[in-house]
Amino acid sequence: MSKQKDSDDLVRVGPGTAMGEMMRQYWIPAVMSSELERDGAPLRLMLLGEKLIAFRDSSGRVGVMDHRCPHRCASLFLGRNEENGIRCVYHGWKYDAAGNCVDMPNAPPHQDFKDKVKAKAYKVAERNGLVWVYMGARNEAPPLPAIEAALLPEAELQISFVQRECNWLQALEGDIDTSHFGFLHTGSVQPEEVAPDSLLRWTVTNRAPEYHVTDTNYGTMYCAYRPAEKSQTYWRFANFLFPFWTQTPQGPFDRVNTRAWVPMDDTHTMFVSLSWRGSPPSMRPLKNGQMVPGGRLGFDYLPNTTDWYGRWRLTQNPSNDWMIDRVAQKAESFTGIASIHGQDQAVTESMGGITDHDFENLAPSDLMIARTRRRLLRAARAFAKDGTVPPCVDEPGIYTAVRSGDFLADTKIAWRDAYEMQMRAAVRPLQQAAE
């Protein structure tokens, strides 16, 4: 298999592609519930290279379908959302949330054939403030993924969307590349500036960790490790979960946070962050009480527009060089780019719409990236060749017992044992709610 073939199979997500067909076996987080109003304007939605519309009907049901009217292909984005359906403004044909044609008013009654017409519509589920779409061919969709954060009550769940102008894989790989943290986000921080009780000091003391990487039943896991004082090891664990989910080491294992890198098409990605509002803070201040220079959290958005790429765009973007401040880069922060997410956004978008994998020179710090690519390729090709069901599709509970985080542990404790100890001690908000 050529390297170019590997690259194409990894990054292409449209209909008929290896990765795209595999991803269509999963439920995809697509829209915030709050984005769709009853009888409100339909929303343009790009998913896996397909141009869709989403709307909420008079009864609250959500429909997601091809934007083209099956009659003459006029866009249903222009349609009237009324009386439990979307009506094409060209000739008045109307479709319910499931895509059934329910009215064909330009045809005489004896020539009406609406029962034989159906828009290309996808299965939809709504849970805890998030709309999910299943784009696969199964008559009965698989269960929704039991991702821990997504199961939290809506009042306890923080949902964030951010669009990124690059391929989904290079965006995701930023989350499973831990050594960049010591440069991109904290490159200007010196060990003596960090509070004594902050684990950040081990990152800025040793910016070249070593790694353990392994396959798991949900995807892949890595831990970066560094020696610490008093016969201890500083561990940072993170996970890739099929097909596009990550968990990053943003603090103790009591944090409940999972992130999706949903392919809109080959060169645009929607970042979806799901986190427990009760999670402890992720970024501790420095010794002087200040945050890491350039380490602002949160997002600054441009106003949404109605075009295919008009949702959840950041003010920091390629058109303004991600608002890089060269003065700040020399005197304050390593990058001169304000905000953690803005820094990640800048480097992954700077690679271009799709990274030229033939130009890369992967290093030992990229073990997790190489392992994850291989895992994805095997799963996608197995599905394409033999119909092998990809990981987690029919076993949604696998997701529930996965966490990430950083901590200190006795050097004598093996890395997998250290992980299990943290998992056993972690706070479980879902269990607390049940009790």
Image (cartoon, rainbow, N blue to C red):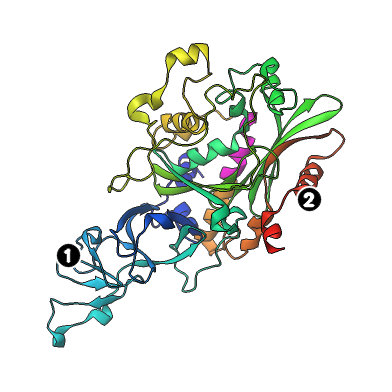
Q: Residue at x 62, y 18 (%)?
A: 189
CB contact under 8 Å: marks 2 and 1: no
| Alpha-carbon span between mark 2 and mark 1 | 57 Å
The percent coordinates of residue 135 (x first, y second) are 43, 62
Tag 2 residue:
424
Give 136 or 76, whichever is nearer the viewer. Answer: 76
Q: Is residue 365 magenta?
A: yes
The quadrant the C terminus occupies is bottom right
Check residue 310 in the rendering and tell me which mark sits there, or answer none: none
Q: Is residue 435 magenta?
A: no
Question: Seen in the image, is 228 located left or right of residue 140?
Answer: right
Q: Is residue 58 above or below residue 391?
A: below
Q: Residues within 10 Å of mark 1 (few under 14, many from 20)?
A: some
Q: Earlier in the sequence, mark 2 or mark 1?
A: 1
**Secondary structure mostly seen in the magenta stretch:** helix
Q: Residues within 10 Å of mark 2 (few under 14, many from 20)?
A: few
Q: Is residue 191 above or below residue 53?
A: above
Name the secondary structure under disc 1: loop
Check residue 89 in the rendering and tell me which mark sits there, or answer none: 1
Name the secondary structure under disc 2: helix
Specify whether residue 3 is in view. Answer: no
Q: Residue at x 20, y 72 (%)?
A: 93
The percent coordinates of residue 337 (x first, y second) are 46, 24
Give 269 or 386, whichever is nearer the viewer. Answer: 269
Q: Quadrant of residue 150?
A: bottom right
What residue type is disc 2 on? Arg
The percent coordinates of residue 334 (x first, y second) are 53, 18
